[in-house]
Amino acid sequence: MFNVENIRKDFPILSRTVNGKPLVYFDNAATSQTPQQVIDVIVDYYSNYNANIHRGVHTLSQEATDKYEQARKKIQTHFNAKLAHEIIFTSGTTHGINLIANGFSSFLKKGDEIIVSALEHHSNIVPWQMLCERTGAILKVIPMNLDGELIMTEFDKLLSDKTKLVFVNHVSNALGTVNPIEYIIEKAHGVGAAVLVDGAQSSPHIKPDLQALNVDFYVVSAHKMCGPTGVGMLYGKEAWLKKLPPYQGGGEMIAEVTFEKTTYAELPHKFEAGTPNICGGIAFGAAIDYMNAIGFDTIAKYEHELLEYATNKLLEIDGLKIYGTSKHKTAVISFNLEGIHPYDVGTILDKLGIAVRTGHHCAQPIMDFYKIPGTVRASFSFYNTKSEIDVLVEGVKKAKTMLS
Amino acid sequence: MIVSITDIQNEIIDEFSMFEDWEERYQYMIDLGKDLPLIDDQYKTDSNIIKGCQSKVWVHAEMNDEKLVFTADSDAIITKGIIAILIRVFSNQHPKDIIDAETDFIDKIGLKEHLSPTRANGLGSMIKQLKLYAIAYQTQLK
């Protein structure tokens, strides 16, 4: 039985105060908080079996290696990848995206096309622009409508035999829109293009079945799903990962080195040069265990309740406008008060102990689309409560009074 | 007779010490932000812009009788209020005094957080810009 008050006890940070007020943490889309169960795993690692992995014959190294590889298995099971070596540990989503963009350099030629969506985060636009500069490929953009949804009929028109790669986020970070990736994957495969899905914003709320999706690549960050920063996952179909050249050279990723030639290691090590974030990987596994113990169906249902409650309450405020009004969205509300800069609202809310994100959310093209400098974004997690939303609503009203 | 930068800063510290809580302090800044038409529209150009990640700040400087006069503006009202305070301190002063001025009065009125680089509102860069203008005009005076 889901009991939010019990869940909250797992998160020590939720009992602190900010500016003399109880913390209301609504910046979950930027990073999620960490439960004691995950913190304990981090402490246990450094207290009991900190060692470099995959090379030592000594006991500590063996223990660390076992835990690290167990974590890979947990991640594989969670995302339902076919093979454990299709899971590559990365430093996070951005690393995963750059790894693929870099790898595709050798597959693309002048005139080839890459399709991205208008809903992308900067980290999802820049690597592709760089890839296009290197290869002469052309970047095409799937446009969005006023609700913040991608227009699929326009996507259909962009597809052709020139399309080599389609890149889209599963959920938009700025607006929370859940994109129809099933449709996008199927259509892209129809013209022989590969698909990379950014799961940074979906993975805290949705448990994707990567085999059923038939997606070629999927990337996530642990810190959005109750894990630590600096670690993430790149999933790639085995055939693709074998074909892609290594991204970084170094230890771990080689089989044999002479000055004449180096043979690369087998998957997944080919893409894991150097000493990885061992503790982070193990803690990522623990975070996945933690979320699964609550259950993603339970999480999704509860967060949807929070979203509806907050949407209704906020819309009662005169002059408040919500950006991103798709029927399919995660628990994210991006909004502005008429005539008031989001920075001012965020500043007042901070004084009241409420953490929200303000600004363009690294998604300037979306802000340009709506012709606004940015928004205030409240993003909810399963450990948030309706009474916290009440605090937010009162805070927004207060900000409005002070700033009008 | 120009009131010195230090005297103005002390005046402001005194004023702020009368506020009981953050709300009064912020309401005062918001009101300052609202009241002051800070910059002539012709100077709200891209070359006068200091881009923060979140709010924009425009600054214009001109010399008047060996004193440097600043006008500035922002699209966010709290940022604008802080600008009004900065203008009150630094505008209408000799470039040399602006260059030599300390800025720790900002800590003393509880606004330090707004000038940290992570705050991304352009204000940290604004003080630097005011001082750079002063250096440039000081060179001219010599």
Image: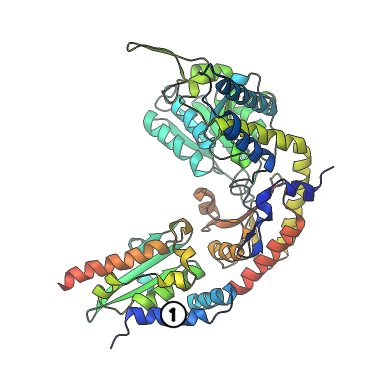
> Label 1's element?
helix
- How dense is the environment of label 1, judged by Cα within 10 Å: few (below 14), some, or many (20 and up)? some
- What amino acid is at disc 1? Ile
Where is residue B8? Give x, y as percent: 38, 81
Left/right placement of residue B109 relative to residue A184 reads left
Where is residue B71? Give x, y as percent: 36, 74
- The residue positioned farthest toward the left in the image shown: B142
Where, by quadrant of the figure, is residue A20 drawn?
bottom right
Where, by quadrant of the figure, is residue A391 drawn?
bottom right
The answer to whether residue A111 is visible is: yes
Q: Chain of mark 1?
A: B
The answer to whether residue B44 is visible is: no
Question: At 57% from the left edge and 34% from the top edge, which residue is drawn?
Answer: A46
Question: At 63% from the left edge and 34% from the top edge, which residue is drawn?
Answer: A44
Question: Quadrant of the image for the N terminus of chain A?
Answer: top right
- The residue positioned farthest toward the bottom in the image shown: B1
Between A146 and A1, the one nearer to me in the picture: A1
Question: At 58% from the left edge and 38% from the top edge, which residue is drawn?
Answer: A154
Which residue, given by chain and number where applicable, does mark 1 sit on? Answer: B12
Where is residue A235? Give x, y as percent: 59, 26
Rendered view: A321 above or below A67: below
Question: Quadrant of the image for the C terminus of chain A?
Answer: bottom right
Where, by quadrant of the figure, is residue B116 drawn?
bottom left
* Number of numbered discs visible in the structure rendering: 1
Question: At 75% from the left edge and 42% from the top edge, which residue is drawn?
Answer: A299
Between B84 and A270, the one nearer to me in the picture: A270
- The residue positioned farthest toward the right in the image shown: A1
Between A161 and A135, the one nearer to me in the picture: A135
Left/right placement of residue A27 relative to residue B55 reads right
